[in-house]
Image (spheres, grey):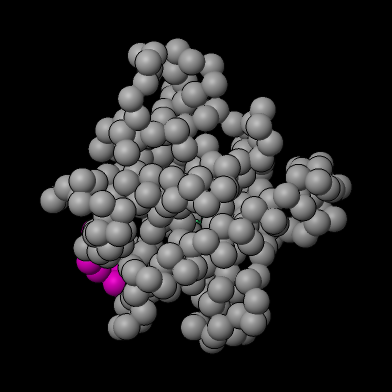
């Protein structure tokens, strides 16, 4: 999966440092390096820790999933894996809306609507959240988005279409791995080629349950102090590595 490039990619300045990742410019103005760290945060940064090898697993898992989406015709920012914790991505302008897709009730949806964790949604539920740490990423609707000019109407339509397509691809993929894709967050970016899926898709941004045991294999293990966080991320990685090729599977 490693990219062989004719041109040498040189790391440039740090463009952005987030809670768990960094983004660097490169000598190519169209490309960035996305670096996954072991930092873990929850509850809008109030809870902080380090999880061994998390950067490695999230980099590899995101690469598997973004590349799989590309193969199924979804445009993403993924270009190639560079090393254990870094991937090369297209430079995009991130739309300041978190797109949450829900198949099963969990987390804030249960609190907001009084649903029981595990209740199946009759159809995928798409929600928009305003990306703002200062405001704690509030839930917003189409009218808020239009009023604040966070995205154009056609962009929002495209984001919804993309999110549903991603869901149609990832839910069956996870099912074949005996995993349930409960919910997840996507970020979209504007590029010269339209809207792309950007950021990461990993146990940091998804709720993933083991289909047989119901065990949580995602960041909820950290949020809820369930223990074995690293082992849960490794489990997701191992199942994907099994499916996408032993060549990518490195013992940790
Ligand atoms: N999520 C995320 N980043 C955020 C908020 C949510 O990746 O800033 C993911 C979260 O991991 C879950 C889904 O989006 O898979 C839905 O999260 P929810 O709204 O239930 O919020 P939470 O309970 O995580 O606060």
Answer yes or no: is residue 236 visible.
yes
Q: Is residue 244 left or right of residue 199?
A: left
In this picture, which residue range is highlighted in magenta?
A: 225-230
The answer to which of 145 and 70 lies nearer the viewer is 70
Tell me: 182 left or right of 152: left
The spot of residue 129 in percent (x, y) is 66, 56
Res. 167 image quadrant: bottom right
> Which residue of the protein is positioned furthest toward the left in this rendering?
251
Residue 122 location in percent, x, y?
Answer: 64, 82
Determine if residue 100 is in view. Answer: no
Q: How many numbered dots are placed on residues in this image?
A: 0
Apparent side of residue 68 relative to residue 115 in the rendered image (left or right) = left
Quadrant occupied by the N terminus: top left
Q: Is residue 131 above or below residue 161?
A: above
Identified at 27% across, 33% down, the residue is 83
Which of the pair 9/110 is nearer the observer? 9
| Residue occupying the point 39% across, 13% down | 7
Residue drawn at (66%, 40%) of the image: 195
Where is residue 239? Give x, y as percent.
28, 63
Q: Nearer the viewer, residue 232 or 177?
A: 177
Does the magenta segment cover residue 110?
no
> Where does the image place residue 186, in percent across and percent down from the top left?
56, 52
Q: Residue at x 59, y 31 (%)?
A: 92
Considering only vertical position in the picture, is 27 above or below 124? above
Kindly report the secondary structure that dominates the magenta region of the rendered protein.
Answer: loop
Up-down relation of residue 228 to residue 55 (above or below) = below
Please determine whether, in this image, residue 27 is positioned above or below residue 102. Answer: above
């Amino acid at each position: 999966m490693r990219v062989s490039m004719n041109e040498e990619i040189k790391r440039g300045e740090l463009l952005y440092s987030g809670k768990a990742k960094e983004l660097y410019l490169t000598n190519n103005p169209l490309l960035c390096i996305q670096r996954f760290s072991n930092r873990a945060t929850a509850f809008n940064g109030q809870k902080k820790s380090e999880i061994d090898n998390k950067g490695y697993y999230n980099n590899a898992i995101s690469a598997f999933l973004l590349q799989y989406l590309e193969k199924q015709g979804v445009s993403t920012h993924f270009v190639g894996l560079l090393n254990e914790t870094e991937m090369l991505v297209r430079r995009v302008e991130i739309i300041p809306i978190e797109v949450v897709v829900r198949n099963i009730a969990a987390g804030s949806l249960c609190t907001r609507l009084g649903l029981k964790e595990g209740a199946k949604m009759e159809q995928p539920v798409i929600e928009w959240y305003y990306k703002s740490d200062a405001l704690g990423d509030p839930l917003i609707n189409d009218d808020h988005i239009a009023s604040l000019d966070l995205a154009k109407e056609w962009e929002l339509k495209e984001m919804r279409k993309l999110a549903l397509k991603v869901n149609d691809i990832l839910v069956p993929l996870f099912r074949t791995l005996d995993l349930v894709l409960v919910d997840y967050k996507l970020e979209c970016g504007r590029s010269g080629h339209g809207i792309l899926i950007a950021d990461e898709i990993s146990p940091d941004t998804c709720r993933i349950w083991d289909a047989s045991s119901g065990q949580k294999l995602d960041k909820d293990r950290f949020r809820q102090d369930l223990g074995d966080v690293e082992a849960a991320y490794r489990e997701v990685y191992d199942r994907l590595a099994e499916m996408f090729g032993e060549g990518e599977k490195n013992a940790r």
